[in-house]
Amino acid sequence: MTSAQIRQSFLDFFREKKHTIVPSSSLLPDAPNLLFTNAGMNQFVPIFLGQQKPSWKPPRVADTQKCIRAGGKHNDLEDVGLDTYHLTFFEMLGNWSFGDYFKKEAIEWAWELIVERWRLPAQRLYASVYKPGPDERASSIRKRTIIGRGYFRTPILIRKFTSLPPAKPIISG
């Protein structure tokens, strides 16, 4: 698939899941603490902070956000050009729920999109769990949804993205 086909397939998939498709916000955000838009969530920060209510019905959206990272927490300038992971201009595909659904649907839909629609080999995927506690819902959902299908021996804890073997996509929920 080309990048344009991946982008369109992603947006079509989430449109089918009743998401409103919103345009990429400006690369120059209306935020005093950001020089550039550096993440797909930037345009939704006022909603996450409770300063605005989502206007979409149901309150879920999907987008493809153009981003620039040139400093700060995600400063990868010294790594640009050394591999295929460190870029300063890139696009993030995002699906967002503002109280409408949570981990269960997010994990199930990630699996459906990546394995069933895009046909990435399930045995090449890793499920990530960030410091799960004994009551962590995502861990049990992940086990039923992904590991329960027989594609994974056990979930692994990934401390840094760089610890992954090369060419291993991640499902993170």
Image (tube, rainbow, N blue to C red):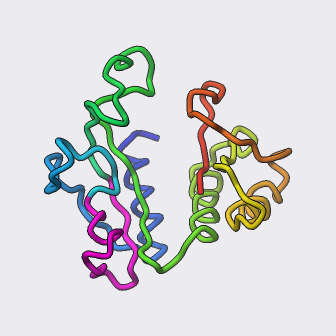
40 lies left or right of 99: left
Where residue 140 sits in the image (x, y, percent)?
Answer: 76, 64
- Identify the residue shown where x is 31% and y is 22%: 77
Q: Residue furthest top?
A: 82
Viewport quadrant of the C terminus = bottom right
Q: Please tell me whether residue 107 belongs to the stretch shown in magenta.
A: no
Where residue 9 sits in the image (x, y, percent)?
Answer: 44, 56
Where residue 57 sits in the image (x, y, percent)?
Answer: 35, 85
Residue 44 found in image quarter = bottom left
- Identify the residue shown where x is 63% and y is 37%: 159
31 lies left or right of 52: left
Q: Residue furthest bottom?
A: 57
141 lies left or right of 172: right
Q: Is 109 placed above or below 73 here?
A: below
Q: Is 150 placed above or below 61 here?
A: above
Q: Nearer the viewer, residue 69 or 136?
A: 136
Q: Is 49 placed above or below 169 here?
A: below
What is the number of callouts on the image? 0
Q: What range of the chain is rendered magenta?
A: 43-64
- Identify the residue shown where x is 40% and y is 26%: 86
Q: Nearer the viewer, residue 15 or 68?
A: 68
